[in-house]
Amino acid sequence: THEERASENASDRLSTSAESYSSFLNPREVNEPTTSKYARGKADSSSTVETTGIFAFKNRNRLVGMSTSVYNPDADLATHLPTAAWATYASVSNDTKKIEQPPSAYAAVYPFNHVYESESGHLIEIDDTPTKERLHWFHRSGTFTEFHPKGIRVDRTMGHHYDMVSGNKNTITMGEENRITTDDSVTTVGAKLTMTASKDIRIRSEAGSVTLDSGAGITTVSGNHVLIDAKNTLVLKGAKIVRDDDAAEDAIKGSWDLSIGGANKTKQQKKDDNTISDSNENVGGT
């Protein structure tokens, strides 16, 4: 199953990360100072923190992801919209976001970094180096939380991450929120779901289908200009299809074939027919 595959992948990452750290786990190498290399800092040539150890490993293995939204609307649709409306619509169709794990802010200077380094390779730092103050909790598997000097927080989990809340959960983001999920994303809401944006909302599937279904409820699609762009077949199915317009205009660029399986009844106040070329009407019955 998907869950079993995810568990296996996480186990592989954990075992791989643990093996990767074997070169700097305790017992420490002989002829090394008893003071942790992370407390001694970069200025101590014996620490080699920039090339070996936890911070070198973290900086070599930073995660980077790209989120791209590409949609090119059919230019023929522009003929049916005001120029200003089309320009706004077309301009929001392409967007790319980059999410990148920042490098560690480690820049400790002895004796300001207070370090606890365990036998298995766990690390806790309270770094008071002037202008480089940090807090850092690191698990030997590679999972860590690090607070940078200006308050930036970096979390990385080398396995599954569970966040359980028994009561309400409230989140305020004062800037952008970017998220990349490399596998399925499932959201289940027990009551109503409301999404509101001050600007554009885009929902797009690159290779799959999109379904909007309200079951026994009402589905509403509304807007100043509404475009339905079917490249092949457009199907409208309903016991009653109602056009609620004071006046309407149907514009068809090419031929129009109308097939009615039963009777056709038309009631109108006035009718004007203007045929520029030939007109053929075939009646099979009375």
Image (cartoon, grey):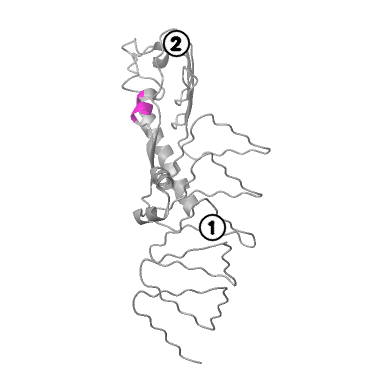
Q: Position of residue 251 (x, y in %)?
A: 42, 64
Mark 2 neighbour class, 10 Å CA radius: few under 14, some 14 to 19, many 20 or more: few
* Label 2 to label 1: alpha-carbon separation: 53 Å
Viewer-nearest of discs 2 and 1: 1
Circle on res. 137: none
Q: In the rendered structure, which amino acid carries the disc numbered 1?
A: Leu
For the residue pair 91 and 194, the one nearer the viewer reads as 91
Q: Which residue is mark 2?
A: 131
173 relative position to 93: left or right: right
Looking at the image, tell me whether mark 2 or mark 1 is earlier in sequence order.
2
Outermost residue to the bottom: 286
Residue 243 is inside the magenta segment: no
Q: Which residue is mark 1?
A: 212
Q: Is residue 164 shown above or below 32?
A: below
Of 100 and 80, the residue lying toward us: 80
Image: magenta residue range: 56-60
Describe the element under mark 1 as helix, strand or loop. loop
